[in-house]
């Protein structure tokens, strides 16, 4: 930084789920007053968008349990634009649980709605994750939408 002689510099941590994964570093060679309070708010917004990009890149590279991007690229090259079919379809009950997950209900709320134990809901959620090849609720919902299971 000393050798470049910027007028000002700004360093902001980039965090995903509370864990620091990087730093947004900006140097300003314009006027010293360029980095104002208003512009800092804009930079915070940019940093938060970077978090989503990091999440996307991690999931695409398989680091986060996501599918391997090479499989998706191979499918695209072959002209297959439809998502891969499920090896084992969801049961009617799993479809009910999936719809309630998509509605934002917790395991406890789903259990109350379906008149079952919370442990039973957890088993259904685990089965849904396995069949959709995901490891998170948000990914399950996204995959289900892609497969047109939720309309």
Image (cartoon, rainbow, N blue to C red):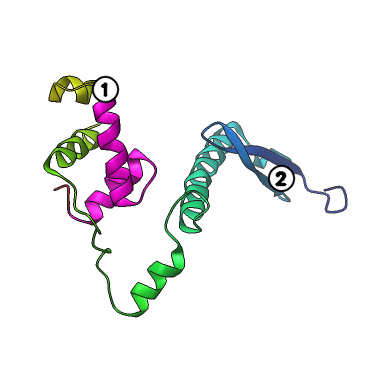
Under circle 2, the secondary element is loop
| Horizontal arrangement in the rendering, residue 29 relative to residue 138 (left or right) | right
**Res 106 visible:** no
Q: Nearer the viewer, residue 85 or 32?
A: 85
Q: x, y percentage for residue 39?
A: 57, 38
Q: Residue at x 27, y 63 (%)?
A: 83
Q: Is residue 74 left or right of residue 30?
A: left
Camera-side residue of 149 and 17: 149
Residue 77, label in figure: none
- The picture places residue 115, in percent across and down from the top left corner, at 13, 21
Q: Position of residue 60 (x, y in %)?
A: 46, 58
Task: Check if mark 1's residue and mark 2's residue have beta carbons within 8 Å.
Answer: no
Q: Measure the alpha-carbon separation of dots 1 and 2.
A: 59 Å
Q: Which residue is mark 2?
A: 31
> Image height check: is 87 above or below 120?
below
x and y percent of residue 63 in the render? 53, 52
Closer to viewer: mark 1 or mark 2: 1
Label 1 CA crowd tier, 10 Å (few <14, some 14–19, many 20+): some
147 to 80, vertically: above or below: above
Q: Residue at x 17, y 23 (%)?
A: 116
Is residue 136 something one can see in this rendering?
yes
Query: What span is colored magenta in the figure?
Result: 119-148
Vertical relation: 81 (above or below) 110: below
Whichever of labels 1 and 2 marks the residue nearer the N terminus, that label is 2
Nearer to the camera, 7 or 113: 113
| Placement of 76 over or under 101, stated as above or below | below
Mark 2 packing: few (<14 Cα in 10 Å), some, or many (20+)? Answer: few
Q: Which residue is depicted at the point 32% across and 38% down?
A: 126
Which residue, given by chain and number where applicable, does mark 1 sit on?
Answer: 118
Q: Residue at x 17, y 54 (%)?
A: 148
Q: Is residue 139 left or right of residue 36?
A: left
Which image quadrant for residue 97? top left
């Amino acid at each position: 930084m000393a050798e470049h002689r910027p007028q000002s510099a700004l360093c902001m941590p980039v965090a995903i789920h509370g864990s620091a994964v990087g730093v947004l570093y900006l140097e300003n060679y314009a006027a010293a007053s360029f980095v104002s309070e208003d512009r800092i708010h804009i930079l915070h917004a940019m940093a938060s968008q970077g978090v989503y990009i990091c999440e996307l890149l991690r999931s695409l590279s398989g680091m986060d349990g996501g599918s391997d991007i090479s499989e998706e690229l191979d499918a695209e090259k072959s002209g297959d634009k439809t998502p891969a079919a499920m090896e084992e379809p969801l049961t009617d009950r799993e479809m009910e649980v999936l719809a309630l997950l998509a509605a934002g209900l917790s395991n406890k709320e789903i259990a109350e709605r379906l008149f079952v134990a919370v442990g039973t809901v957890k088993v259904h959620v685990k089965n849904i994750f396995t069949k959709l090849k995901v490891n998170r609720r948000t990914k399950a919902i996204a995959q289900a939408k892609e497969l047109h299971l939720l309309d």
